[in-house]
């Protein structure tokens, strides 16, 4: 087959998957029914873990340069400021990217499309997948091009990254279970003045409260554009414009709104697909799970899906792993999606409901709990790890084994910066298996790794390594996506080889 993987959908999830595959030498096509990349800001928040994954793909710095770092959280009651917390150090010591980055989806997609073009792959916009069939050996997709002509394409695997109304999911007949909220959200990108609409260099997230509703104001673009997002006031229909909510928005945020660059309303659903894999077809991002925008996790979870699946498809297609490795995609990502949707569903119901209990929940969360947590370094660090998806792990999964220090198989590889310009995540741009040791590498382990083509990366033992839970002289077998597969305090080469052989894993020979 001239095309090994067809990616349906060119949002951040599909583009990240394509970039992961192309970087590993897989032949890919990417199609999207839209005429081009997103024309609106849409999703904004890019979390720390997503930037770490993008770093390995070579695009993190581009996003950081194009976005706005969040440095402050404010709680407002109209023009009255209730609390201000500096969160510039929220993820300090945990990641090279210890912050939330606001980078609008249109910019985000343009950067990824550009990176793919540099790698020799053009995204086929205006092309729709209108049908698919599969057998044990291939997937046959029917594509409708921009001119209306049909093409039948045979590929090894197909990835459905085509959003919450996924055609791929419908073609598979996969159930998409969950609930939808009765209330609607309002979202607007505006130029505004006032404390809540802080300048980009301040990078403020402002939680603005009223008696029955709230609005969140966040930086949308480096040019000073702000994003207003929150509940549509009750009593308004679906066919509304910004002028219908201007008074509510300005009163709640204590701002004066000038230009309106984009306005929309939308509903919120909490749903998870019954399966993320059906034979040779996979569901990723919103096609597999969708939830409320609270916490800014949706787009980031889709990119996590993409990188998780990307290295596994590459290994299978290049004969470095058995097809059974692909089962681990659903085994690892579906439980996380279910937990995330359940969590955001509960928080959403408590914060957005009507009545006395909902008002009390909002008051406790925004006026009491949030300022109290962010007032301490420990609280800011915990919040940064949770929101940034740094705590996401695959303990107990089919590829995870062992414990050394506080780090277990399935954990994200801890980030340590020795201060010499080469931190522990720098080697992950190889997109392949590797072994990390803080301390001395024993000759037997070095020999076993050399025999299998495994790169070994060694760092001197340090207090920073101890602080993040690593153990001196332990060996950590790291997957291509930066998660620890095997944590072995004894550096036992036989255990390392058994771990690989039982799963049929053959790393790409290192340089």
Image (spheres, rainbow, N blue to C red):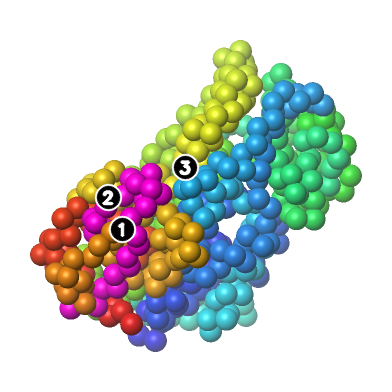
Check disc 1 and report its element: helix, strand or loop: strand
Say which residue label 1 marks: 438
Point out the stretch of residues depicted in magenta. Answer: 451-478
Q: Earlier in the sequence, mark 2 or mark 3?
A: 3
Q: Is residue 445 visible?
A: yes
Q: Is residue 278 left or right of residue 242?
A: left
The quadrant in which residue 511 appears is bottom left
| Quadrant of image for the N terminus | bottom left
Q: Are marks 1 and 2 in contact (CB under 8 Å)?
A: yes
Distance from Cα at disc 3 to Cα at disc 1: 23 Å
State the count of labels.
Answer: 3
Residue 116 versus residue 475 in the image, above or below: below
Say which residue label 3 marks: 385
Residue 57 x/y as whole percent: 48, 69
Name the one closer to the observer, 130 or 232: 232
Name the one closer to the observer, 344 or 385: 385
């Amino acid at each position: 087959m001239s095309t090994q993987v067809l990616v349906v959908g060119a949002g951040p999830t599909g583009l990240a998957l394509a970039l992961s595959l192309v970087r590993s030498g897989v032949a890919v096509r990417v199609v999207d029914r839209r005429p081009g990349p997103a024309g609106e800001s849409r999703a904004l928040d890019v979390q720390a873990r997503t930037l770490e994954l993008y770093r390995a793909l070579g695009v993190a710095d581009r996003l950081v340069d194009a976005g706005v770092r969040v440095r402050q959280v404010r709680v407002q009651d109209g023009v009255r400021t209730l609390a201000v917390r500096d969160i510039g150090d929220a993820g300090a010591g945990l990641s090279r990217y210890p912050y939330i980055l606001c980078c609008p989806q249109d910019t985000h997609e343009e950067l990824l499309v550009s990176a793919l073009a540099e790698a020799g792959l053009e995204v086929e916009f205006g092309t729709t997948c209108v049908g698919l069939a599969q057998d044990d050996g291939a997937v046959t997709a029917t594509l409708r091009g921009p001119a209306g002509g049909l093409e039948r394409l045979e590929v090894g695997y197909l990835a459905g990254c085509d959003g919450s109304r996924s055609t791929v999911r419908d073609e598979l007949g996969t159930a998409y279970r969950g609930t939808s909220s009765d209330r609607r959200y309002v979202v607007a990108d505006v130029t505004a003045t006032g404390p809540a609409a802080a300048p980009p260099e301040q990078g403020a997230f402002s939680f603005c409260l009223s008696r029955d509703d709230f609005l969140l104001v966040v930086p949308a673009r480096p040019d000073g554009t702000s994003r207003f997002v929150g509940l549509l006031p009750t009593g308004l229909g679906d066919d509304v414009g910004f002028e219908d909510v201007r008074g509510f928005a300005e009163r709640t945020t204590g701002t004066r709104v000038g230009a309106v660059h984009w306005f929309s309303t939308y509903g919120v659903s909490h749903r998870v697909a019954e399966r993320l894999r059906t034979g040779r077809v996979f569901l990723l991002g919103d096609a597999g799970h969708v939830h409320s925008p609270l916490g800014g996790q949706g787009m980031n979870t889709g990119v996590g899906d993409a990188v998780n699946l990307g290295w596994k498809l590459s290994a299978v297609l290049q004969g470095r792993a058995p097809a059974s490795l692909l089962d681990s995609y659903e085994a690892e990502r579906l439980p996380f999606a279910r937990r995330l949707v359940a969590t955001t569903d509960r928080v959403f119901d408590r914060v957005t409901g009507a009545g006395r209990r909902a008002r009390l929940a909002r008051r406790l969360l925004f006026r009491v709990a949030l300022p109290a947590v962010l007032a301490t370094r420990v609280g800011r660090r915990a919040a940064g790890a949770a929101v940034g998806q740094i705590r996401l792990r695959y303990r107990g999964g089919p590829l995870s084994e062992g414990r050394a220090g506080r780090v277990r198989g399935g954990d994200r590889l801890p980030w340590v910066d020795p201060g010499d310009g080469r931190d522990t995540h720098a080697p992950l741009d190889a997109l392949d298996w590797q072994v990390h040791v803080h301390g001395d590498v024993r000759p037997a382990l070095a020999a076993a790794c050399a025999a299998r083509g495994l790169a070994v990366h060694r760092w001197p033992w340090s207090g920073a390594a101890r602080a993040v839970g690593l153990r001196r002289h332990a060996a950590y077998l790291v997957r291509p996506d930066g998660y620890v597969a095997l944590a072995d305090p004894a550096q036992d080469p036989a255990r390392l080889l058994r771990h690989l052989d039982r799963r049929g894993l053959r790393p790409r020979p290192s340089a």
